[in-house]
Image (tube, helix red, strand yellow):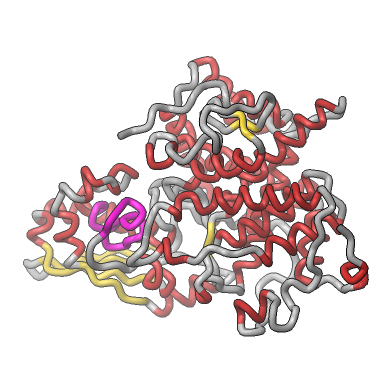
Amino acid sequence: MTSLNNIEQKWDKVLEDIVDYVIGFDVEGNSKEAMETAFLALFDTIGCGFLGLKFVGCTKLMGPTIPNTRIPGGCRVPGTDYQLNPIEAAFNIGCMNRWLDFNDCWLANEWGHPSDNLASILSVAEYISNDNISKSKKPLLMKDVLCAMVKCYEIQGVLALDNSFNKIGLDHVILVKIASTAVTCYLLGGSRIQILNALSNAFIDGHPLRTYRHFPNTGSRKCWAAGDAAARAVQLSLMSMTGEMGYPTCLTAPKWGFYHVYMSDQPFQFNQRTNYSTYVMENILFKVLYPAEFHAQTAIECAILLHPIFQEKGGLNSVESITIETTEPSIRIIDKRGILRNPSDRDHCLQFMVSVALIFGELKSSHYEDQVAIKDTRIDLLREKITCIENLQFSLDYLNPDKRSVANSISILFKDGETHKHQIDYPIGHRKRRSEAIPLLKEKFLNSLNSTLFTSSSTDQIKNLFENPSKLNNLSVLDFMSIFSLSIASTPIS
């Protein structure tokens, strides 16, 4: 359907800037660091997905919508034998990658996980590669996937720098939908107008509320919300490729536009970054050691460093009180008291995570499960002794573009009168600690392979590719997906 009014209307500049960046920016020619970081992010995200496949809460949501159906030559899902349409594949990949809250992170006025976009990128890249082969054309290469990742990261991250969707009640996966729609429509071969059409539909779509991330409704939707956003992005892109119309002033239209409905007529702000490049990928925050909400990462690290003195002093019964100084966003998101109803509730509770780290000297996904969280009563008893307060300097440095710190400090007052304190400003996944993190990220990915049922020869292929980055760029997407989809999914835990 074509409308003369749409042809004559001027498009909102925010949409035009995004689309012009997607079409015109040369990632590979502008930033070697971004491409190298995208390589790490690719494998780290897939490894998080392999870990997610261990959990029946995740795998019960996966597979074809109609059970036991398979699309010959369909889009594959790493670690499984599924062959699906690209919309279903995007949901599946996004669900498993995000399930354990262990993939990378971006923190600003809005928060989020740019690697959520990989779900739509991989599914569409394989879909279009299969289509190309059927037409005697060449498939996409993995360097195309890396470049697409950089662009999705940039769009999501730049929009998040100065614009808080959480303050108006919307969940950050809105940005996954927006970034993925623009980039996947481009991968599909969309023209400038087709990408604009798709992107406008992403903005005017219904958007998830954040209530599933907060008391009293925290629940497992936060684990599959990214998959839902990625799938919708693919659907909107495919619709646009048929010629479906767009909405040029979807943001600025009086009364009915996004700005009026959601933002009290205030437009998006671009104070920290006025253009799109490779900034976000270069500064992405990796979750290296702990499957936990990112604002808690340095607190967990502090707690593990304090674990030996906690044990030496006698553990729980030796503690009078514990004070955690943290950032304002941390107070808003993960400062929780009272009953924690499920793993999703627990991995977004600062007191719970710190308590586990102090008691066990580590924090793993299994600690959030009922068999530990409920049965070990020490955790809740220690939680009751913890108070969280905002440190104003931490909050200022958190938003300072020259620092972007995510600081926490923990002070333990013991009953014998001694106080022990530790403070960490930058988590190990921060750009300032990248050299320290890379060996651990590699270990994290290689360990994730233990969660799969890949044959030893398939595992060796994956390891060889991971340990030789130069081989990835010119590998076809089809060959990559074949390597990562040679075995059925791991048996879920009960």
Residue 261 percent coordinates (x, y)? 63, 78
- Asked if the stretch drawn in magenta spans residue 112, the answer is no
Residue 339 percent coordinates (x, y)? 23, 62
Q: Is residue 202 above or below residue 442?
A: below
Q: Is residue 151 visible?
A: no
Q: Is residue 155 above or below residue 251?
A: above
Residue 152 percent coordinates (x, y)? 67, 54
Of residues 178 and 426, the one nearer the viewer is: 178
Q: Residue at x 12, y 63 (%)?
A: 319
Q: Give the main secondary structure, helix, strand or loop, of the magenta stretch.
A: helix
Quadrant hosting residue 106: bottom right
Quadrant hosting residue 415: bottom left
Q: Is residue 315 visible?
A: yes
Residue 480 percent coordinates (x, y)? 65, 28
Q: Quadrant of the C terminus?
A: top left
The stretch of residues the image draws in magenta is 340-357
Q: Residue at x 86, y 28 (%)?
A: 135
Is 478 placed left or right of 296 in the picture?
right
Is 63 placed left or right of 259 in the picture?
left
Is 95 placed left or right of 450 in the picture?
right
Q: Residue at x 22, y 68 (%)?
A: 386
Q: Residue at x 54, y 42 (%)?
A: 45
Q: Report the number of discs.
A: 0
Q: Is residue 352 above or below residue 484?
A: below
Q: Is residue 311 above or below residue 19?
A: above
Q: Quadrant of the N terminus?
A: bottom right
